[in-house]
Image (cartoon, grey):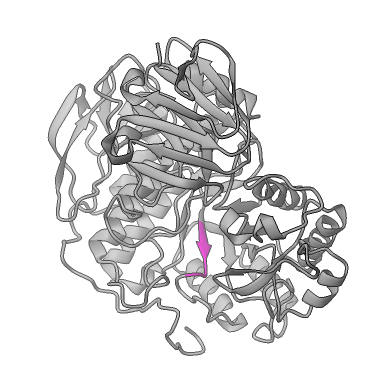
Amino acid sequence: MLSLTIAGVPADSSVAALAVPAGAEVHVVLASGGHWFGHGFSHVQPYPLETGSIVNPRFAVNNIQCPIWMCSAGYVLFADTTTLLDVRLNADGDGLLAIRAEEPFTLRLFHAATLPEAQRALVSTLGWPPPAPPLGDALFCTWTQYPRTLTQARVLDFARQIRARGYPATTLIIDDRWESAFGELTFSADFPDPAALLRALRALDFDTWLWVTPFVNEEAATFADLERRQLLVPAKDGGAARFTWWGGTAGLVDLTNPAGRAWFTDRLRALQALGAAGFKVDGGDFKYQPDPDGAMWHAWQGHSGYSDALLATVEAVAPGRCETRTAWLSQRRQVLWREGGKDSHWGLDNGLRAMITLALHLGLLGYDIVMPDMIPGRVQTLASDFPLPSDELMVRWTEATTFFPLMQFSYAPWNYAPATEAVVRAYAQLHKALEPYLTAEAAGRTAPLLRPLWYDAPDDPRLYPVADAWLLGRDLLVAPVTTPGAETRDIPLPPGAWIDAWTGAPVSGDLTAYPAPCPGIPLFVRAGREELRALLTPALAAIPRGTVPGGVTTTTYRAGLDREISVTG
């Protein structure tokens, strides 16, 4: 039985719901539940959760987060609220999950004989799964190649390079700084003929998505009119309620106001009419909203409710052709879920390892059609003096991302030496080769498409702590390398017979110091799935194993926001 108290009083963990009074603290003894999963984004991303510590006294939507925690003992705890929470998990090693809010909320509990059974009961109540988008192609985004240095010529050149170099991509995202000003949602003078650009991209077989936010900066031509019409969240003392975000000082389109939602929808549909196929949604985080104490919303949705209103608005315009890095209880939406910006290093502190552990948590939370941030992370766009990613990191990041439901490039692979780029392109083609498998596994799924090793073997205690391997669908096991210089790794396999996808050799049980050259990510197919092996074998044969050395960086292409580049990029 889970050890659970509310305001110091033992609570019955076998019931379906518990009322938590305002200010009362829920305490769960972590050890009583075994291994823990859920929560969503944390800058340091422990997996299982009890192996680290998360302290967030202002837990509200920031990237993809979720007030849900689940454990291997078969319990799921769901704080069914959009209000601000104080969440402390294993704070100072105290072994507790503590949850508190200044407003009353309902704590919903799901319990079953195994965690997968309880998890399935949870996600069914949240409306999961939505229809899966097309899977297999790589997405390309302009952000780290041309951060805030976009022009029409550079976008077209980027698209031509992708096509000429043979990448299987049909979605190109035009990121930050295509607008004349944030919140105008019209192209700047750097795009003299956007309709012609979008037609040219369509002729190159690209669907073009545009980066959009609900922020309207003070300098935007739209600001004064939207402020006058109270379509920006009003301030209680008059005018628009202003706030600061990374792009300046802005007001927020009030999507809880039908007139505000109609204005934003009309702007998106005008961009569609121009030729845009979809949208990359940014914003929705609580920290990028007006202070609720000084704001006068049309219909306040709670500290974390606005993000779903934003996604609902964009989804209605472009279902299945929009992506976001921000969500709170939006699992039912036809949206591509993207991890927030990852730093270009190996670590659990928002690097490659965190990319993997976050994906494992998100899959269990119902965000299983997940796309990592751009390969190989955001490079120098956070700080221009960060080191450029090595060839080894570029390849290892690509290897791991190849076996996500979706993969995305931005820092161009051709920035690297031709031999390194050839490896990266071969992995993108391998991801494309998996399209029939991904499509079949995603259709009508009752389990996360990307899921932990234990999901199909919940009685095997060896598998719950595994933080660096996963299943893509039921029958493909992925075991990437997340340590620089490593060429072997240990791999605990789930019960049953498996086949090494590279060699065809049968394997089972615990594998020790298993070969993992760079490139050469360990991959295993469940025995009997010959059609899956047939998809993989020719694509793997095109990858020269062990040809990319450690300690080498062949790219010199800077991605900092403060650089200047030539007209053609």
In the image: residue 528, left or right of residue 255: left
- Is 398 left, or right, of 183 in this rendering? left
Q: Is residue 451 above or below residue 314?
A: above
Q: Residue at x 14, y 55 (%)?
A: 485
Please determine whether, in this image, residue 43 is positioned above or below residue 329: below
Side (left or right) of 14 relative to 497: right
| Residue in the picture at 29% in, 57% down | 395
The residue at the point 39 percent across, 17 percent down is 3
* Relative image position of residue 230 (x, y in whole percent): 84, 64
The x and y percentages for residue 229 are 88, 67
Tell which residue pokes out farthest to the left in this image.
Answer: 513
Above or below, 455 relative to 518: above
> How far across and down, in percent of the image, does residue 203 sit?
66, 68
Residue 448 can be seen, yes or no: no
- Whether residue 207 appears in this view of the structure is yes
Q: Is residue 399 magenta?
A: no
Q: Is residue 140 magenta?
A: yes
In this view, the residue in front, 200 or 259, is 259
Q: Main secondary structure of the magenta part?
A: strand
Q: Residue 201 at what x, y percent from top left? A: 64, 69
Residue at x 61% of width, y 67% of height: 204
Quarter in which the N terminus is drawn: top left
Q: Choose top left, top right, bottom left or bottom right for residue 360.
A: top left
Q: Read off the magenta span.
A: 139-143
Q: How many marks?
A: 0
